Every structure is written in structure tokens, then in C-alpha cells.
Amino acid sequence: MAGSQLKRLKASLKDQGIIGPQRSKKQKRQNAQDAKASTDKRLQRYEALASIREQFNPFQFKTNARGPKFEVTTNKPQNDKLAKGIQGRPGLAKATAEQRRRETLLVEMQRRNKVGGIVDRRFGEDDPNMTLEDKMMERFAREQMKSHKKNTVFDLEGSDDEQEQVTLTHAGKTLFDDDDIEAGRDDFDEDVSDMESDDERSARKKFLKRLRAEEEAAEGEGEDGQPERKKTKKEVMEEVIAKSKAFKYERQAAKEEDDDLRVELDKELPELQSLLFQMRPKETKDPKGPAVMAGIDMDQLEKEYNMRLKQAAREARAEVTDRTKTDEEKAEEGVKRLKEMEEKRLRRMRGEIVSDDEEEEEQKKGRKKGDDQEVQDEADEDEFGLGKGIKLRMTATEMGLDDEDDFLLEDDLIASGSELDMDEDNMSDMDGSDDEDAYDPDEDELVNGGEDGESKEVATKLQAQSRGGDEDGIPYTFTCPESHEQLLEILGSLPVTKLPVAVQRIRALYHPKLDAKNKERLGNFAQALIEHIAYLGDKFEPTWFPTLENLIRHVHSLAKTFPIEVSKAYRSRLEEIKEERPLALTVGDLMLLTAIGTTYPTSDHFHQVVTPAMLSITRYLGQKIPQTLADYSIGAYLSILALQYQSFSKRYVPEFVNFCLNTLCSLAAEKPKENLGLFPVHEPAAGIRVKGASNVTVRKLNCGDCQQPKSARSASEDSALKVAIISTITSILRTASETWCKLPALYETFQPAQRVLQHLTTKSNAAQLPAALVKQLKDTTTGISRLLQLAQVSRRPLELHHHKPLAIKTYVPKFEDSFDPNKHYDPDRERAELAKLRAEHKKERKGALRELRKDAAFMQRENLKVKKAKDEAYEKKYKRLVAEIQGSEGQAANEYAREKAARLKKNKR
């Protein structure tokens, strides 16, 4: 068993000879005399101690305890550390890094958010090798360089050689006299101000006069024939300074002249101001009458001027118009707009979000472009100076009616002989209400007529019209009904065929431009109109169909201006259908479902109104078990609506196909002997199957067939209705096959339909049907069979590749005689360099991240130290203050006790 750490340390020290038996005085004296031996022994002692420290501190070195990962043979020599397995000194490296961070990062942390400080710019203070003479020479050289940098090429003094001269001194005084000092002084340092006294000015003039006299005398001596002597540097400097002072004096003289002229102008300025701002004397008003100028009243003229000024301020500024576009550019813009609209429709169909801001911006752009185009068209029409010409009636395109559901005012809306009774003030009030209502005139083309002036004139005439009637007895004015009960009360006496005219006149009378409350009234009127359409549908008569179509167009036009009110009315009706009669739809419900399909886009992936309507349709088709021919007729009508709803998006509706196939199987003369497909087949009621209808004429279904008959039908009428239902369902199936011809599951979807149609064309069933219907069934079967063949051909089963199998590449191994595992042997030099750069980048990145983490840890430790120091100081101060307070409180308490005891003692006496 190994001894303790202390015992092993003593044994190591004894083995190295560091400790041992005590030496005698003679041995110590001999070692002291031999200096070389003592030095060697000291070095050996240091090395021995270092080896012992390494031996007894195993955590100081980083070693690979498991050895090398791979046993390889290499010619690369290993140093002592690698031979010993030492890979680093973490303790030493950590201490070095800590010291380096204290010298750099800690200093930066301490200087953070601190401004100012003293920077020692003295040279030679921190250099112990520089002598006093070297410091003085360095100081002199820097002063010369500093003075040299201040000079510029625009100085009036002499050349650079003269600038570089140094002023010599002796005993603390210059070697020049006062005149030389005055001559060497820079005259630009003098303060040229207006505060100079007259004595100084006269002295300067005398000095300049004396200089000019000396120059003239020197020139005269030169003219006598004597040779000109060379001027000394002092004379040159004096001459330059004298010229500079002369120029300076001339500038000051010019400045004085300008000042004198400015003073004179300042004195005359009040007179000029009185001339410039002279006010016209007020004219006394003539008591006889108002002031008149050119036969016009001045007050009226000023009022008219102010009114015109306000109108001009409110007018919109003219904008820069675009250039005239060619026909190709116009066509290209139209195609681009159509593409954008189709792209938005497809996005809505896929369920993607389409922001309303984009649509509003595009609508504004389209309106702006349309206005610019109208202006351009007017300019083109007036190109030859013939004017606009006479227009009998504007076309729908000129009126801006881009929707088939919009219409114009007809002549019968206005009574003959009516007069315009509204004044200009009312018209201006109506104009002001436009801005308050924020109504968009492009949303409703009923009253616009293409121009605002015409609409206002027509509306004004309608409001001024009395409670009379036209030739058909329809009044020109109505009270705007805001509920269905009011609508029945107001329009109940009118014939149903005249309702569109009444609705048209109500919309014109209560146009949102005429009153701020009309917008709310028309919104409620739109909801009442939707209820009235359903009401008329429940009491349907065959002659009412054009009327219902016109009313639906009115709802479509109102939905542009009042989308929320119209959608609420539709949704409330759909909710009523869901709760009360999900499988017993009426003709009014069918009318509303038709109106929804014409009012809103049915291709959207989700719509607030269309989606519930589609659910109502599929609920009836999927869950209703028909018992009467009216049920089959309603299902056929809903199948047509479902197909129309999916005409753009082409989404598959399984309830639609199931109902159509079940209807054909139920109406067939004979029941199929085998199962024709995977669709539910309901056993029909008695008398539903077709019998003896070979001589019946094929007709189309109408809305009256969707109602239960008031009296029993005859056998021929029942046969005709059954034949009409079979013909309609057959046409629907053919249209559906063409609509969904690109679906991947077309074959599985319409193969049962093919079998059902083939069953109807068998001899036993064809004998009971008309020849025209049998021909239609055969044509539909042929078309669907052709589509199924194409769908089957387009399908290809999975196959393997038909090309020759490719062999796997093989390489002959390459042997390296001098292989080094730390070296990469890539034949591609660029790839090898790139790999090397990547490895270096990765290494540097890891090192940088490591250093950043260490810096962050160091900063946290230092911040913690600072925080601890502050907390300790605060705690110490807090304890000291508490101790002082407690001491003072104790002292006061003692004084109080002593005083109390003294008083008690005094009282006892």
C-alpha cells in the first residue's frame, strides 16, 4: 500500500538531494567558495523541484488516458511531450488567459460609459533608456514639425527657408531690437476693428508715408547710374511687411467708405419705408347709397370674389396625365387586368387569403385609369374641332355599366310636365352630403346615368313629383319600406309584374346622395326585398318568372353597395331552412339559392353565404328520400344549381352523382337485376316508374313542377313529367362528365353512370320511353364511354426502367509510400484547398465562440465581484448606521431613565 501524499513528497525530495542530513561548516564553506558549483546546484535544484511539481500535480497536464485512437506507423518524430502523452497545460493556459483578460477586457469594462480622462502624451517618460539630452532633442524636433505644419502656401511672409528660421535668444532676451521685433511680427494678428483711435490711425499714415519716401529715394539713387546693391533679408522682410500694411490700410479705407454710405442710407430708410408702405386714406361712404364700380355693387363683388376664392381653394389640383396609349398597349393592359382577376379568383378558390387593401388599391387605380381614358377619348373626339356632336342615347359601355345586372333610368320614371322646384342651396346641401356618406358613385349605376348632373336632376324631379301615377297606375313616389311587412303594405296593391318598376323608383327616390339616412333605409329595403323574393317564390305562378329574375338583378345591384345587409338576409334565410325544413324545400328557397349563385362568386374555397348555401343543397341531395315527383323535380333543380356553383372551381360533389343515378334507377321502367354501382338505391314509391310513355313529347322542367299539385294530375301529365325528369338528369350527367373530365377519379365516378344509362337503353326500358329520349340516352352513354376510355388510357401502371443496368464504378486502390494520417490526399487541388479552408474556418469559428464564452464568463465574474463589493459596502454602511441609531437611541433611553429616576427620587423627598 502506497504511503500518504506527504510521505511520498518527502521521499522524492530526499531522492533528489534537496533535503537530507545537515552539512558541516566545512562543507558549507567549500560550497560557498565554489561559485560555479553553487550555480549548477541551484539550477539542478530548480529542475528537480519542477519535476516533482509535475509528478505530484496530475491535473496540471492534459493527457490522453486511452492512448492513440489508431495504431499507425509514421516517420514523423515525436517530441518529449508527445512521448509522455502530454497534450497541454490547462491550468497554465487558464491562468495566462485570465491575466490577459484582466489587462485588456477588464480595462475596457472599467472605462465603459466614462468620458474624459488624462492622457499622458509626454515622450520619453516611460523609456528609461532615453537620456535628458535625447529628450530635449526630441522635444525640439517635434516643436519644429508642429510649427512647420501650421504654415500654408498663402502666407504673405517669405519663403519656407525664412519660415524655418529659429529666433535666437541670449540670457532670456532676443538678439533683435524693438524695431526688428515689430518687423518680425505678423500684421495679420492685429485686430482690424472699428474701435481704433485717431492717434493710432494718424501714426499709421505717417509710418506708411515715411516708407514710401524711402522707396522713392532708393529708386532715385538707382537712377543716378550707381549699381543697385543686393537687399538684405531684413530689408526684404520690411518691404513685404510694409506692402502688407499698405494693402491692409486700403481695405480698411474702403470699409470706412462703405460704413459711411451705409449710415447715410440708414438715415434715408424711414422716408423710403413711408413711400413703400403708404396706406390709402379711407374713403367716406356715401350716405346716399353703396359704393358702385363699373355699375356693380362693391359688397356683392367682394362676396362673389370670396366665394370664388374658396371654390378655387377646394378644387383639386391638376395631376400629370399619362401619354396617349396605343391600341396594343390598351389591349395588353386589359389582358393583364383579366389575368390578375383570374389569379385572385384562383387564390380564393384554393382557400388562400386575399387582402382587401390590394383590391381597393386596384379598384382606385382602375377608376383613375378610366377617368384618364375618358378625358383622352373626349380629346380624340374633338380632334377636328367639330365638338362632341349630338348623342341621342348613351350606350351601356359609355355609361360605365360593366355588369349585366345594372340598368338605366327609363323615361317612364318621370312624369310628363313636372317642374324643378329645388333651389341652389338644397343642391349644395346634397353635394355636401356626398362627402359625409362617403358613397362611391361607381357602386350603383342606377341613378348615375354616367354623369352626376343627370342623376341629381332626375332625383330632384322625382322628389318634386306629386303623388300621381303613370299610365299603368304606378305611383311615382313611395315610402321606403324597411321591413317585409311594410313592403307588403306599400306594394301589395300593385300587380306582381310591375314590382321591378316600383323597386327602381324607390331606389331612385332614396338614393344615398340625396340624404344621409338613405343609405340605412336602402340597406333595410334590400333585406325586405330578399324576403319578398322568397315570399313570391312560395306563391309562384308561371308568369312571375321574369319578374323574379328582375328582382334578383336588383338585389345583385344592391349587394354592391350594401354587402353586409344583403349577406345577413341571405344567412338568416339559410339558417331558417336548416332549422325548420332542411329536407322540405320550397320554390322560394330555390329562388334564394339561385339568387345567391348569381350574387356572389361560387368558386371561393370558403364564403360566408355560398358555403352554407352549398351545404343546404348537398344536405337535400344526400339525405332526402324522394316520395313524389315534386321531390325529384326539386332534386333536379338543386343538381343544376350545384353544377353551376362548381363550374369554375370544378370541385367534385358526391351527393350530386348519387342523387342523379338513384333518380334514373327509380324512374326506370324495370328495376335493375344487379347492383349497378356503389351508390345508395332507394326503393321508389308506387307509381313512380315510367309506364307507357313512348308517345309522350319530351319537354323541359319548370318551377311549377317543384310544387305539389293542387289537384291530381292525369296519367299523361305524370308520364310527361317523368320523361322530363329523366331527360333533365341525363343532360346534367353529360354536362357533369365534361366538367369533371380532368379529375383523376373520373373512371370510378362515371362508370356507374355508364351502367345506369345502359340499363335505361335496354329493350324492356326503351320500349316504355319516347324515341327522342332513347336517342338522348344513347348519345350520352356514348359520350361518357369515350371519356372513360380516354381516362383509362391516360392511366399507366408503374414499370421498371427499360434501360441497361448501370455498373457500379470501381477504383484501383492507390498506395502511398510516405503516408501521413494527418494529411489529406485529395487529387482535386481546388477541392482540397476548399476543404482546408473549411476546416480552418470551422476551427477558427469554434475558437472564437470559445473565447466569446470565456469572455462572457469573465465579465460575469467581474460584475459579480463588483456587485458583491457594493453589497458589502452597503451592508457595512447599513450596519454602521443602525449601530449609530441604536447607540443614540440607547443613550436617549438611558438619559430618560436617569431623569425619571431623579424625578421619582425628588418626589419621594
Image: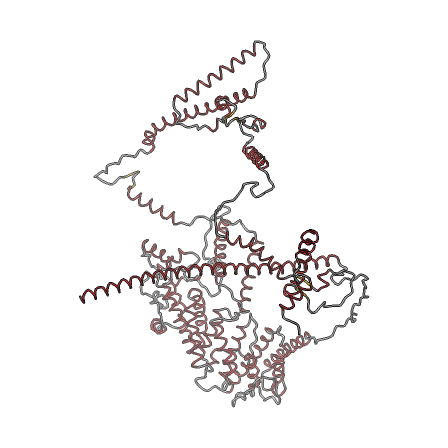
Vertical relation: 336 (above or below) 223: below
| Quadrant of the snapshot with the C terminus | bottom left
Q: Position of residue 151 (x, y in %)?
A: 55, 32
Q: How is the image coloured?
A: secondary structure
Direction from residue 684 to residue 830 in the image, left or right: right
Where in the figure is residue 7, as x and y percent of width and height? Answer: 64, 68
Point 44% across, 28% down: residue: 191
Against 222, residue 600 (above or below) is below
Q: Nearer the viewer, residue 397 or 749?
A: 749
The image shows residue 693, relative to residue 483, as above or below, that is: below
Q: Position of residue 467 (x, y in %)?
A: 31, 65
Where residue 336 sits, quadrant-wise, is bottom right
846 vs 602, nearest the viewer: 846
Of residue 1 and residue 609, the one placed in the foreground of this image is: 1
- Residue at x 47% of width, y 29% of height: 189
Image position of 211 with respect to 775: above or below: above
